[in-house]
Image (cartoon, rainbow, N blue to C red):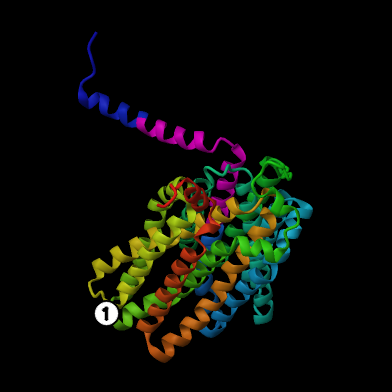
Amino acid sequence: MELPNETDAEPAVGVLHQVSFLRSFAERVPDKNVWRIYRITLALGMAYGTAISVIATFLTKHGVSKLAIGQLAAWFAAGIVALSLPMGPLVRRFSAKRMLAVSLAGYAAAVTAFPFTHSFLALAALRFFDGACSVGVWVSSESILLARSGKENKAFVTSLYAIAVACGYVGGPILAYACTKFLPVEFAFILAGSIAIVTSVYVSLRLAPDPRAELHEDHPMAAIAKDSTALKLLWRIKTSCFGTFAYGYFQASVVLFLPLYLMERKGVSQPQTVIIPAYFAGGMLLFSNYAGRLGDRYGHLLLMRILGVIGTSMVLGFVYLNSYAVMCVAVFIAGASLASISPVSLALQGVVAHPSEYERSTSIYNAFYAAGMLLGPFISSFLFEKHGGAVMLEQLALLWAAFVLFAFVFRKDDPAARRRGRAAPRGA
């Protein structure tokens, strides 16, 4: 019997490594419903990416001004803000599964109707409804993920959730490009709506009912959760809320104004600025899962502080960097650090809150994210207009520095920090 030579064995070894890698993911997340949420998130991300990639082109084609396009974006964020807090009680009353299916169907209706609506007020109403349905999807999905993950792998689970979102946003524009290559731009919105309605049906047919969240007396948060008000809950998850507020503020500002700053002050061409977001997304996609594992092992808030320090230095770097290649590296590192804070902050509030509070905690959490999205472009545009892009970037770095300081002052919010404190020897 002949033994296979090295070249014959290499493909087999590679396949075995891939199977082992995928098996390790399945072993860490055994609940099939979590993987169904990932599929739902990926599909919805593709629907979002499809619609978002053509919305500015469609509106400009129909004579909508740039100012009005910005106002429509604000209406979308306003819908998120308005429904964030009420969504928690709604999910608790009707179940996360039902609200997820309804929210997906609502988004499908809004995005499908968008290309057939021509008055500004009607477009604003659709964008508001779009935001309201979007926050319904986020609160429902995140409540299910937190409820179906253990405290030892919450950041791992939420990091895969963030990766599913990012992959959807990458795939959506590709779909939109293929669609608009052969069909009018209006069909991209119809395609997005079709994806969303199919996903809504999938939720109804395949997703299991919500797991029951009972106040077990042995749970570390049981006594606190029994008579916890919204304000008390907010105080417990404040570091997570600050983290997601900072990310929403940063993300909404950078998407709009970093390309302008690079073209005006750094001499970067417009085609080169188009590639910049890909480096940011690439950093997040490659590192967020490792960040999740590190957060679960060493403490979520500790990791968030470290990532915040790294990301702050990258944001400040844009003020002083002049090489395009070096700036691409800085964007990649910023994506790996700052974008990874988002899933880790979600995991932290899942550890701090009791399972019976997940609906309320995720609704509060998303309200802060939406508030950041609303305030970021408004304040950043003012600073850019009055004082220039460097000052705009410096205030973003200052925001992240404030988060790092806040997270250090309240480091004991993370149960992992309290455990380390108890384990430390006396006099240390």
- Say how many tags the image has: 1
Q: Is 55 on the left or on the right of 302, as rendered?
A: right
Mark 1 burial class by Cα count in 10 Å: few <14, some 14-19, many 20+? few
Residue 303 pos. (x, y %): 43, 55
- Residue beneath disc 1: 267
**Looking at the image, which residue is at 44% across and 56% down?**
302
**Looking at the image, which residue is at 57% across and 83% down?**
68
Asked which secondary structure carries label 1, the reply is loop
Q: Nearer the viewer, residue 174 or 238?
A: 238
Residue 99 pos. (x, y %): 72, 54
**Looking at the image, which residue is at 63% across and 58% down?**
362
The amino acid marked with disc number 1 is Gly
In this view, the residue farthest toward the bottom is 386
Residue 174 visible in the snapshot: no
Q: Is 290 on the left or on the right of 60, as rendered?
A: left
The correct choice, above or below, for 154 with respect to 111 in the image is: above
Numbered range of the magenta stretch: 17-46
Q: Residue 31 sits in which quadrant?
A: top right
In this view, the residue farthest toward the front is 427
The correct choice, above or below, for 25 with respect to 89 in the image is: above
Q: Quadrant of the N terminus?
A: top left
Q: Nearer the viewer, residue 319 or 59?
A: 319
Majority secondary structure of magenta residues: helix
In this view, the residue farthest toward the top is 1
Residue 379 pos. (x, y %): 50, 83
Query: Does the magenta run of residues contain 76?
Result: no
Q: Nearer the viewer, residue 310 or 336?
A: 310
**Looking at the image, which residue is at 30% across and 72% down?**
317
Residue 59 visible in the snapshot: yes
The correct choice, above or below, for 39 with respect to 385 in the image is: above
Query: Does the magenta run of residues contain 27?
Result: yes
